[in-house]
Image (spheres, rainbow, N blue to C red):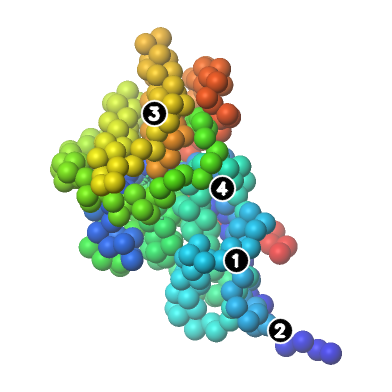
Amino acid sequence: MKSNNLIYKATAIAPANIAFIKFWGKKDSQLNIPFNDSISMNLNRCQTKTYVKFNSELKDDVVIVNKKRIEGTEKNRVVAILDKVRKMSGLRMFAEVVSENDFPSNAGIASSASAFSALALAASVASGLGLSKKDLSILARLGSGSACRSIYDGFSYWKKGRDSKSSFAVQFAKPDFWDVADIVAVVDTGRKKTSSTEGHNQALTSPYFKTRLNELKIRTPLLKKALLDRNFQKFGELVEEEAVSLHVCAMTSKPPIFYWNRGTMEVIETVFGLRSEGILAYFTIDAGPNVHVICRNKNIKRVEKNLKKLKSVLFTITNKPGLGARLEKNDNN
Ligand code: DP6
């Protein structure tokens, strides 16, 4: 029997990113509008591949992440993006979404940025929408704020904007702009106790939150300049200051959130030790205990060696500035 089954599909790959100036606290938690601009670098060794297949025979959306079918809130976040794409394209079909990370799913590395930027690109292409990078950044942001920074190659700048239309990222520098690396020292593979989404909501309860926003008015342009000047020492100092600021805010939220553990402190001390030996390495930490150590390419081996020696470091992932969201050429799905 001839089937009239219609299928529209696409596969995309997108990177996670590490923020040097961080998104913390949402002005609008439905639309993921931040209180402040942020700056990030894509991680070339932490990527998600996602295929989206709109299929006229499906009776519901099916979402499979790292080989497991997901339901509930997690699935709803994906369906919200599919709904948005269906609305924009006029396509009235359910979709099968299959998503896989190329980094260990237990590495404690937030995969929402890579997942939602890959989903935004794959879903919009599959549905026939020819979205610009700006519109893809907006669509990815609706899934997870930080995902809007994973659309472009290399380094990105997310201008906070006033509303959904004006809150998106732009490319700040290409991947080969700077020979820097991010070595992730994984000290915990468990799921974090407080998600970044909850952290954002609690941020406003910290008495330090307003001070942080005022500090960012100075820190953000300084870091932007240090990056453009390729002034690694200045850049590193600001990256650390920023990471500590986020965590002071988290620790002083009500209730307080302590993302750090003993391993986190051990890695921080190792970074200080490296600097006392003349190796420029700096730390930054997202909403979890794992530490991102930023260094120049020439120092990668030395930094990796010192990190791997630590009992609390389970493994490391060495990243260079990566490409942004792109389509997979040989789409065999
Ligand atoms: C600490 O983008 O993960 O990594 O929009 O709720 O998904 P949701 O939050 P998310 O927050 C990222 C927080 C951060 C800092 C950053 O990446 O800028």
Judging by the rendered image, the residue that carries numbered circle 1 is 63
The single residue placed furthest to the front in the displayed view is 255
Q: Helix, strand or loop at disc 2?
A: loop
**Identity, as a three-letter code, of the amino acid under mark 2:** Asn
Task: Judge: label 2 CB < 8 Å from ligand 1.
Answer: no
Query: Which picture quadrant has residue 242?
Result: top left
The numbered mark, 2 or 1, whose residue comes first in the sequence reads 2
Judging by the rendered image, the residue that carries numbered circle 3 is 283
Rendered image: mark on residue 5: 2
Q: CA distance from mark 1 to mark 4?
A: 18 Å
Q: Quadrant of the N terminus?
A: bottom right
Nearest to the observer: residue 35 or residue 187: 187
The numbered mark, 3 or 4, whose residue comes first in the sequence reads 4
**Identity, as a three-letter code, of the amino acid under mark 1:** Val
The numbered mark, 1 or 4, whose residue comes first in the sequence reads 4
The single residue placed furthest to the top in the displayed view is 277
Q: CA distance from mark 4 to mark 2?
A: 32 Å
Where is residue 301 drawn, in percent x and y?
Answer: 55, 20
Task: Give above or below for 238 relative to 44.
Answer: above
Q: Which is in the foreground here, disc 2 or disc 3? A: 3
Q: CA distance from mark 2 to mark 1?
A: 20 Å
